Image (cartoon, rainbow, N blue to C red):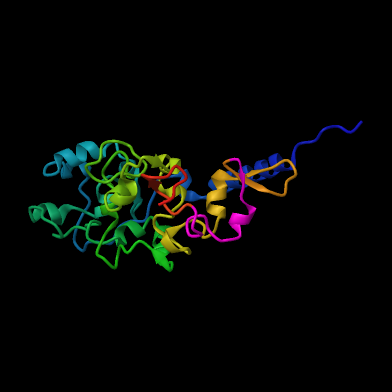
Amino acid sequence: MKKPGIPSSRVSGLIFAGVVFLLLLACPAMKQSAVHPPATIPGAEYVGMESCAGCHEKTVKDFKYARHAKLTVTLPDGKDVVGCESCHGAGSLHMAAGGGKGVSIINPGESPAACYQCHPEIQGFFSLQYHHPMEEQGFTCNDCHNPHGENIMLPKGTLIGQHNAPCDECHRDQSRPFVFEHEALREGCTICHSHHGSINDKLLVASDANLCLRCHAQVNATGDEIVVGGRGHNGFLERGPCWSAGCHTAVHGSNINAHLRD
């Protein structure tokens, strides 16, 4: 009698999980919070985060609980700098000048260059054919992320941890309530969209019906028909992507049709 083996799908899943685990171990950014030092400010010295609290008391108080507060810059002399100056640079001249934007200090709110120091992969996304027009329209990372907040994925001033909060700021028509909602929005816009940049139009993570089939695909008993919602879809899928083939055109939600049609 043949002993039952491990299903091939499970084996593949175990192999994939193992590869991801090894990649995480090999990635220095995952093992420590050390970052590239910001651009040098000639003549400035590091003064420590508590010195910044003299003028930025609330920001420093809240920042202590933020993920970015753990970033560490190791200087050539071996000294570690933690906190505000990890991104803004040495602050002594800024303090001597009495503060002010752009006064002997690096302001990531004016340019994403400071953020790219630690996030070069994000800069790569913005170089793709389809990307958010951040630099073209004068946006910065701060327009979507709050670097000083406990949750940097939320815009400044947003308190509720909603997945779509950064997108809602500009894409209100897509995020408004619908009579018939697309349940995927509960998981967040990034389920379907690569939010920084993509090789696909509309920043989609896939350009064809495979995008929808990741959540909606079933296969009937004979294994030759793709079933969605209890109905065979092979003939429909030949027409093209679900949202542009004349079927489910109201992809974010509909007020008139439960099948997400306009």
Q: Main secondary structure of the magenta part?
A: loop
The quarter of the displayed image where residue 97 is located = bottom left
Closer to the camera in the image, 252 or 148:
252
* Whole-percent x, y for residue 184 in the image: 45, 43
- Taking the view exactly as shown, the residue that stands out farthest to the left is 98
Whether residue 136 is visible: yes
Instruction: Identify which residue is drawn at 32% across, 37% down.
Output: 161
- Taking the view exactly as shown, the residue that stands out farthest to the front is 256
Whether residue 79 is visible: no
In this rendering, the count of numbered labels is 0
Is 241 contained in the magenta span? yes
Q: Is residue 197 above or below residue 26?
A: below
Closer to the camera in the image, 80 or 120:
120
Closer to the camera in the image, 240 or 5:
240
Instruction: Identify which residue is drawn at 30% across, 55% down.
Output: 141
* Whole-percent x, y for residue 43 in the image: 19, 61
Image side of residue 150 versus residue 10, left or right: left
Q: Is residue 148 above or below residue 100?
A: above
Q: Is residue 30 above or below residue 129?
A: above
Q: Is residue 45 above or below residue 135?
A: above
Span of residues in magenta:
230-247
* Whole-percent x, y for residue 195 in the image: 40, 54
Image side of residue 125 versus residue 175, left or right: right
* Whole-percent x, y for residue 49 in the image: 22, 43
Is 138 contained in the magenta span? no
Which quadrant: the N terminus? top right
Image side of residue 55 versus residue 207, left or right: left
Instruction: Identify which residue is drawn at 57% across, 54% down.
Output: 210
Instruction: Identify which residue is drawn at 40% across, 41% down.
Output: 181
